[in-house]
């Protein structure tokens, strides 16, 4: 319960920046931090910023994507060079991290390296787990950055484009159904490629 109150407090604090003149700067910092350690996703701030200033929605999405990519590189660096000193901190204090989840991600990297990074960037799965795990398991860095940029950009630009065209009326749809739909899309996409691979044998 205490953890949930702490997360809710952070959520409300992040949301408060939407009405600030420093909303864009806060979005950049949030996107960067969320990719390696911060628990609140950038969508929380991206959505109200896009609604309040629809003419800048795509610019917000670009800034969000680039900052998240840089944060992903930091996460990779943490995993690659500092994980043995920081693992207990992440397991204890950063939501989404556990030894079981981390080991499972390592197994998945052996089979689906690009798709794991892309999927975490595009879906609600905690992206920070993937960025740090990529460094720990020494995934090819160039591939990691490409997959991260494609996945993160696809998510943020999709949100921003919907809000640019439809504004406030689409917010309820995004809040309620967006994450479920992108997960379904990823399942169908990966399933389609798995089927093509199976048919090729």
Image: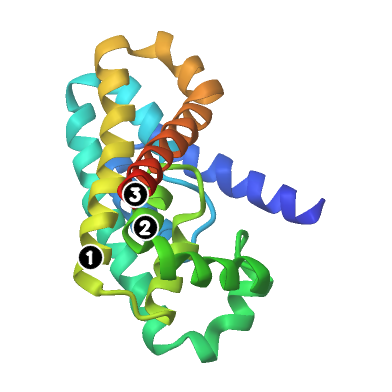
**Label 3: which secondary element:** helix
Residue sitting farthest toward the front: 201
Query: Residue at image x 62%, y 65%?
Result: 101
**Front in this rendered view, residue 160 or 137:** 137
Residues at marks 1 and 2, CA–CA distance in whole angstroms: 9 Å
- Please give the name of the residue rendered at 57% of the width and 40% of the height, measured from the top-left corner: 12
Whether 20 is drawn above or below 120: the answer is above
Could you tell me which residue is drawn at 68 percent across and 53 percent down? 6
Query: If you read the primary sequence from the N terminus, does the residue marked by circle 1 or circle 2 appear first?
Result: 2
Name the residue tied to disc 3: 197
* Crowd tier of the residue under label 2, counting other residues whose Cα lies within 10 Å: few below 14, some 14–19, many 20 or above: many
Q: Are marks 3 and 2 in contact (CB under 8 Å)?
A: no
**Which labelled disc corresponds to residue 143?**
1
Residue 21 visible from this viewpoint? no
Question: Which secondary structure lies at badge 2?
Answer: helix
CA distance separating discs 3 and 1: 21 Å
Pointer 2 residue: 117
The residue at the far right in this view is: 1
| Residue 168 quadrant | top left
Instruction: Say whether disc 3 or disc 2 marks the residue closer to the N-terminus.
Output: 2
Q: Look at the numbered discs 1 and 2 and tell me whether their residues touch, using CB distance below 8 Å.
A: yes
In depth, the one of 120 and 87 nearer the eye is 120
Residue 127: give x, y in percent of width and height: 44, 56
Q: Is residue 175 left or right of residue 8?
A: left
The quarter of the picture where residue 192 lies is: top left
What residue lies at 36% left-to-right and 35% top-to-bottom?
A: 46
Q: Report, in whole angstroms, how far the alpha carbon at label 3 lies from the one at label 2.
A: 20 Å
Percent of width and height locating residue 191: 43, 40
**Element carrying mark 1:** helix
């Amino acid at each position: 319960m205490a953890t949930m109150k702490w997360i809710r407090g952070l959520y409300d604090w992040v949301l408060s920046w939407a009405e600030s003149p420093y909303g864009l700067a806060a979005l950049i910092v949030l996107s960067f931090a969320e990719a390696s350690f911060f628990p609140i996703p950038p969508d929380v701030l991206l959505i109200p910023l896009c609604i309040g200033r629809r003419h800048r929605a795509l610019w917000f999405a670009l800034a969000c994507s680039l900052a998240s990519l840089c944060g992903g590189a930091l996460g990779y660096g943490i995993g690659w060079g500092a994980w043995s000193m920081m693992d207990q901190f992440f397991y204890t204090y950063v939501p989404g991290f556990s030894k079981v989840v981390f080991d499972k991600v390592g197994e998945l990297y052996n089979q689906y390296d690009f798709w794991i990074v892309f999927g975490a960037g595009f879906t609600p799965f905690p992206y920070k787990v993937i960025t740090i795990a990529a460094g720990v398991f020494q995934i090819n860095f160039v591939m990691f950055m490409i997959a991260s940029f494609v996945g993160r950009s696809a998510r943020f630009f999709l949100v921003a484009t919907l809000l640019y065209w439809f504004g406030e009326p689409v917010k309820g749809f995004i809040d309620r159904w967006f994450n479920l739909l992108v997960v379904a899309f990823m399942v169908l996409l990966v399933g389609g490629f798995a089927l093509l691979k199976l048919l090729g044998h």
